Image (cartoon, rainbow, N blue to C red):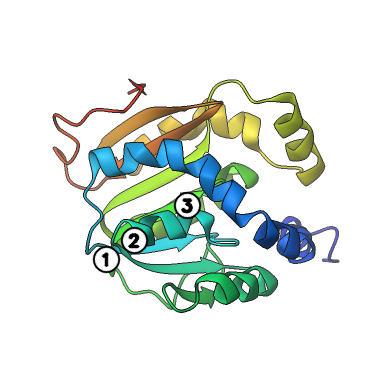
Amino acid sequence: MGLLNDYTDRHRFIFDVIAPVYSALDKYVKKGHSKPFENVINVIDVRGKTVLDIGTGAAAWAALFMENGAKVHGVDFSKRMVKHAQKRYGDKIKFSVGNAMDLKDFEDESFDIVTASYVLHGFVFEKRNLILKEMHRITKNIVIVNDYYGHTHPVGQFLEFLEGSDYKNFKKNFINELKDLFPEIMVCDGANGQAIYFAAKKKGTFKSKSCIKKRII
């Protein structure tokens, strides 16, 4: 199929084009992630943990794990995104180019945590499910997703319309999609239309854990 007809190729093309903008805005994006990330470090001690960040982009989300003591590998299907991320964090975070639906370069249960930030809402269910299954395969136990929840700001709605994402169905169905793959789920309200979704292979992982603001489930 042609570049603009195949969704994945179109998605890659868009992110290749906007990679310099993402890189330039890195510190602002990271600042926006900092508050919801407090839920991550409140629930999990990431120090010394190995973390795979899928759809790492300019690595703002990956950098928060790194700054809190994790050993991070970021993977993205956009070569230009990876190039910009390497310029900023290449001495502290390992990067590679890869397809989130087929991460064959990574062995089963090879990372303590597998995460993704504002990635999964962009894919229709069939492709999102493939990504989730890869996350499930690669993690030893924990998956963390930072993404949309509840009301989305009109600007965000417009951008998602332009991107052609599946964010509406994502918000409606994602918790159940996680439940289909993981026995343990915890969701923290991250405010401003986002949430931190925690999933674990092992029951009891999030027992007695609390969210900074509000625990949704």
Residue drawn at (23%, 58%) of the image:
47
Q: Is residue 133 visible?
A: no
Q: Residue at x 58, y 69 (%)?
A: 85
Checking the image for residue 175, the label placed there is none
Mark 2 vs mark 3: in front: 3
Q: Which residue is mark 1?
A: 109
Instruction: Kindly identify which residue carries mark 2.
Output: 137
Residue 24 point in image, percent of width and height: 69, 59
For the question of whether residue 79 can be seen, the reply is: yes
Of 81 and 89, the residue lying toward us: 89
Judge whether 28 appears above or below 209 on screen.
Answer: below
For mark 3, what is the residue?
Answer: 116
Q: Are marks 2 and 1 in contact (CB under 8 Å)?
A: yes
Residue 90 pos. (x, y %): 50, 77
Q: Which of the pair 157/39 is nearer the observer?
A: 39
The residue nearer to you, when weighing 3 against 21, is 21
x, y (%) of residue 10?
A: 78, 59
Where residue 5 sits, quadrant-wise, is bottom right
On the image, which quarter does residue 37 sit in? top left
Q: Quadrant of residue 55?
A: bottom right
| Mark 2 or mark 3: whose residue is earlier in sequence | 3
Q: Earlier in the sequence, mark 2 or mark 1?
A: 1
Q: Residues within 10 Å of mark 1 (few under 14, many from 20)?
A: some
In the rendered image, the vertical position of residue 184 relative to residue 114, given as above or below: above
